[in-house]
Image (tube, coloured by chain):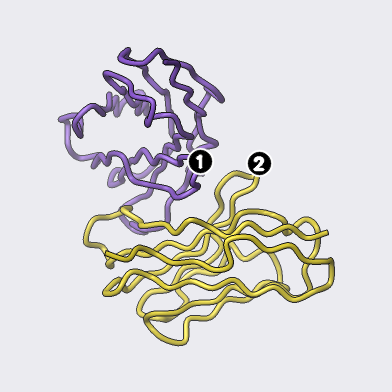
Chain colours: A yellow, B purple
Amino acid sequence: DAGVIQSPRHEVTEMGQEVTLRCKPISGHNSLFWYRQTMMRGLELLIYFNNNVPIDDSGMPEDRFSAKMPNASFSTLKIQPSEPRDSAVYFCASTLGDYRAGELFFGEGSRLTVL
Amino acid sequence: AQTVTQSQPEMSVQEAETVTLSCTYDTSESDYYLFWYKQPPSRQMILVIRQEAYKQQNATENRFSVNFQKAAKSFSLKISDSQLGDAAMYFCAYCYGGATNKLIFGTGTLLAVQP
């Protein structure tokens, strides 16, 4: 079975550039999450969607960050303009509603470096 | 505030031995769930074990078991017969019944397995 697929795996960009991270959840899952992992702050939930609708975006750090889920099989996290402090590993995860609470299936992450 | 604390940044264990990773949490909720996730060098987070707070019996999954002390708000992970493949970062996580997929993670414990 295909797991959660994220792209790109690595991204290096310069400050001020737009960055788009992509995620394909597991087929049939109806909840999707974006997490950010840094040494300083650990794993933080940025936003999550249920049935393609954003439910909680309270973790999105600022207006430079936006996330969309146009359909059940695709989501993007966009940073515009990017800053060095956005450097982190960004994880996408999916799950099937409340089937088994808290059991998320993670992708391998996108490592972002902003110079 | 709901928090998860892992006080051991790093641990080491000899192959075939047993190791226990510690986790404490703080919550005023009565309906909640606790988890241990593993993050190997590949970065992909994988659920190791899951515990419902209302269950008194400690969860077990093969070589992995937990010691859930609800009154003390403690949730430790025991790995028996440690294997080289167990080397990873281990994260303790929590969510409550009202937001069953909004996981709060601890800062992680890096486990090294010595041959």
Residue at mark 2: chain: A
Looking at the picture, tell me which residue is in the foreground, A75 or A43.
A75
Q: Amino acid at mark 1?
A: Pro
Q: Position of residue B21 (x, y in %)?
A: 41, 23
Give the position of the C terminus of chain A as an image quadrant: bottom right
Q: Amino acid at mark 2?
A: Met
Q: Quadrant of residue B47?
A: top left
Identity of the residue drawn at 84% across and 72% down: A16
Q: Secondary structure at mark 2?
A: loop
Identity of the residue drawn at 66% across and 41% down: A39
Circle 2 sits on which residue? A39
Q: Is residue A97 left or right of residue A73?
A: left
Q: Is residue A19 left or right of residue B5?
A: right
Q: Position of residue B26 (x, y in %)?
A: 44, 35
Circle 1 sits on which residue? B41
Q: Position of residue A25 (x, y in %)?
A: 38, 70
Residue A36 in the image: above or below residue A62: above
Q: Position of residue B56 (x, y in %)?
A: 17, 31
Residue at mark 1: chain: B
Q: Residues within 10 Å of mark 2 (few under 14, many from 20)?
A: few
Looking at the picture, tell me which residue is in the foreground, A102 or B72.
A102
Give the position of the N terminus of chain A as an image quadrant: bottom left
Q: Nearer the viewer, mark 2 or mark 1?
A: 1
Q: Quadrant of residue A15?
A: bottom right
Identity of the residue drawn at 48% across and 43% down: B105
Identity of the residue drawn at 42% across and 15% down: B115
Residue B93 in the image: above or below residue A66: above
Q: Quadrant of residue B29?
A: top left
Residue at the extreme front: B115
